[in-house]
Amino acid sequence: MRPIFRIICLSVLFLGLSACTPRDRYIAISGYAQGGTYTVKLNLKGVTARPEALRDGIDSILTRIDTTLSGYNKGSQLSRFNQGESIVPNDLFREIFLAAKAYRDETGGALDVAAAPLFDAWGFGFSNDSLPSDETVDALMEACDMDRIPQDLTHADGQRLNYNAIAQGYSCDKVADYLRSFGVKDMLVDIGEIFCDGLNPSGRPWTLAVDKPVDGNNDPGAQIQAKWQSSGGPCGVVTSGNYRKFYIRDGKKYAHTIDPRSGRPVEHNLLSATIVAPTAMDADAYATYCMVIGLQEARAFIEGRADLEGYLIYEEDGQMKTWASEGFNLI
């Protein structure tokens, strides 16, 4: 799970990135967010919309997502829903709820946004609690149930939701859809997670780095394990791991990946999972899912899906090892 960004100031527009042909015109749009930034790189070739208009549209999308789905924005629809208020859910709220429910059903409950109280209890949600008792965990597991939420989504009926496992991927897809509507073909959308399509300013498919999953590696790109290159087609790329969000109590590490089926942080040797999927939300969801189920099940899951590629980093006999699916394009 990663916290969804909350936009807190206007984005910045950069012009004049290198281009692969004289007719190409790459720009970068960056915005500041609570806890980080987003960056969108795109080719204006064949696009009639002004860069400033595209920037304003991206800001509008991300602001709307924040006011709908952020658990850190106390006035958002999600926060009010979780507090037991009656809401009038908008299209974003309905869409992501249905997607989350489908992921829950597909994964047998290993990916469940209604496990928000469990995330809170372990200190990885919207509160700072930690180390709940077995009795507390069992009671929360019994109480968490998406199916208790009314179909009209106007009130929570005692449930709380946390979309951190899919919201950033969902945001990438929304921005990419918006850019496509203006004819953008070459793009890289980075909102904590990645969606890319087409070519980079050098005229080659986009290349991304996979961070080395060592505890305390909190600076993306500072320690790189591998590099991946896209095929040039549209895809989401997301890495999930337990090396940035964890705490240690009495010598034991408690990682932020919670298995809703056990109600407890996972304990296995899988350090990170990078997933390439048709959409960024799928990549986001399935990367988290792999971190829940562990190395062997994750490998089997990836190999069983023709629409996914994956790269798993794990520990064995005190050493860091890797596995990549056949179509994961390491360079």
Image (cartoon, rainbow, N blue to C red):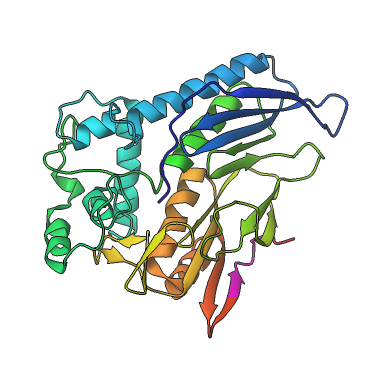
Q: Residue at x 55, y 17 (%)?
A: 56
In x, y percent, where is residue 249?
Answer: 32, 68
In x, y percent, where is residue 228?
Answer: 68, 56
Q: Residue at x 26, y 51 (%)?
A: 120
**Residue 77, quarter of picture:** top left
Q: Residue at x 81, y 27 (%)?
A: 24
Quadrant in which the C terminus appears: bottom right
> What residue occupies the far bottom of the structure in this picture?
317
In x, y percent, where is residue 196?
Answer: 63, 41
Magenta stretch holds residue 155? no
Residue 306 is at least partly visible in this image: no
> What residue occupies the far right of the structure in this picture?
22
Q: Residue at x 62, y 32 (%)?
A: 40
> What residue occupies the far front of the structure in this picture?
250
Residue 266 vs 23, above or below: the answer is below
Q: Nearer the viewer, residue 57 or 221?
A: 221
Q: Nearer the viewer, residue 154 or 192?
A: 192
Q: Nearer the viewer, residue 128 or 267?
A: 128
Residue 188 is at least partly visible in this image: yes
**Residue 38, quarter of picture:** top right
Span colored in magenta:
321-329
Residue 78 vs 313, above or below: the answer is above
Q: Nearer the viewer, residue 302 or 137?
A: 137
- From the viewer's perspective, tell me whether residue 248 is left or right of residue 157: right
In x, y percent, where is residue 99?
Answer: 35, 43
- From the viewer's perspective, tell me whether residue 262 is left or right of residue 300: left
